Amino acid sequence: MDGVPSAIVTHHAAFAEAARVIVSNQFVRAASASDAVAGVHPQTIVEPGDEQELAAVLKLANDEGLGVVPRGGGTKLGWGNPPKRADVVLSTARLNRVLEHAWADLTVTVESGCTIQNLQDALARQGQRLALDPLWPRHATVGGVLATNDSGALRLRFGALRDLIIGVTLALPDGTLAKSGGKVVKNVAGYDLPKLVTGALGTLGVITRAVFRLHPLPKDTRTLSCVAGNLDDAQRLLLAIQDSQLAHSALQLRYAENAALQLDILFEATETGLAAQIEKLQTIVVAAKLTDSGPEIWKSRQALYDDANSGEAHLPVAKISVLPSCIAKTLKLLARISVNLRPIHFCAVLQATGLGCVRFEGSPASVAALLPVLRAEVERDGGSVVIADRGAALVPGDAWGSPGDALPLMRSIKQQFDPKATLNPGRFVGGM
């Protein structure tokens, strides 16, 4: 602990000793290099066995003035800003059960450490699903996906996480287990804590369990793709499909320099229904040839991250949010800026909702120079640009961009929930 103030060392030793009493010695260990959080190395890893133990350990750390980083599957620990302090990693790995699947009510209650894939497998036995397609479902946990508000192409039809979550239990830094929402879809009583903590990056509390509304598994699916001649053509096709009466579940645009623009569309229906939908689609795309591309196409967003992390390069990735009508404009802007900053290149996957991700290939200095220009233009149109993964060279700068006039309110809420800034200090918007 070279360079760490002696008072912090003393507090940490007291914390570790007390934590062992709560969770037993085998679930408290010294952190290793692989436990680093955005380049910041914690001292201790604690794995509580239930939400009461988790709340008690969190209160201990809060009382000792230690910084706590909640961790699920660890797939998105690099997202956001590096923490100002990361003394303790609080793991939800042992909180991994599906507590109740009320299949008749189309709801499920699940602990936050359960992986998305394990949850989906359990729901599928009753012909149901959580209509969500986040990154790395075999490793990403319910709590981590909620904290980062990670959703994919299915958001177009089924809504965002805030539309799917109907209840949550949250461990607060003072040791309180706060519960909001319920087990029925129409429950509106009480403070809307589920929506508040979704996307808060674990800065308000540690999610210990969640309740979701569910959807039936589709009878059959079909993914079709077509080539768009240029960005303007792609924009027109996207908007035409969205304005049509097609009942598609997902629609995305794949962009890569020196490659054809690809549009992908997902239909979920009966065999007869699929045939009717495809026939209608052909009248919209007209000249474009439709090809069966298969379900793997919907992993294109994940492939951007996986390719970015392959080998030694580890390239930076940004999340963007723009109006659906500004997709082509944004990609043209990116192309124009990157030309001026050669050798920087990019590829992107954007959903018809206007949400997407962009992977950059270039020096950290070039990417750092590009982001403010891109952000200024995108924010002027009401969008946002967030650095989701800084890459191996750690692209400098704030991950979040401008919070607008919401920052005072966000800080006030943070003060109410976490007055000592114990949870993920500095990682969220405005350095919260």
Image (tube, rainbow, N blue to C red):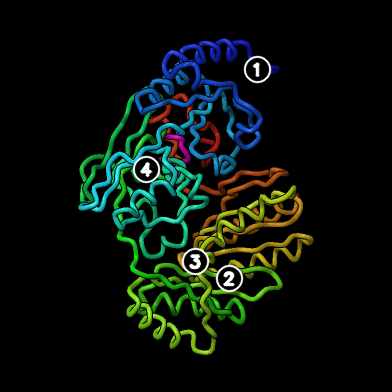
The spot of residue 154 in percent (x, y) is: 42, 62
- Name the kind of residue labelled 2 in the image: Lys
Q: Nearer the viewer, residue 155 or 396?
A: 155
Q: Residue furthest right?
A: 343
Asked if residue 296 can be seen in this view, the reply is yes
**134 drawn magenta:** no
**Which numbered disc flags the more N-terminal residue, 3 or 2?**
3
Q: Nearer the viewer, residue 126 or 104?
A: 126
Q: Residues within 10 Å of mark 2 (few under 14, many from 20)?
A: some
Q: Which disc number belongs to residue 4? A: 1
Residue underneath mark 4: 196
For image coordinates 44% across by 71% down, the residue present is 266
**Helix, strand or loop: magenta stretch:** loop
| Measured Cα–Cα span from mark 4 to mark 3 | 32 Å
Query: Relative to 406, is 297 above or below?
Result: below
Q: Which disc number belongs to residue 340? A: none
The spot of residue 225 in percent (x, y) is: 53, 76
Q: Give yes or no for contact between labels 4 and 3 (Cβ–Cβ under 8 Å).
A: no
**Which numbered disc flags the more N-terminal residue, 1 or 3?**
1
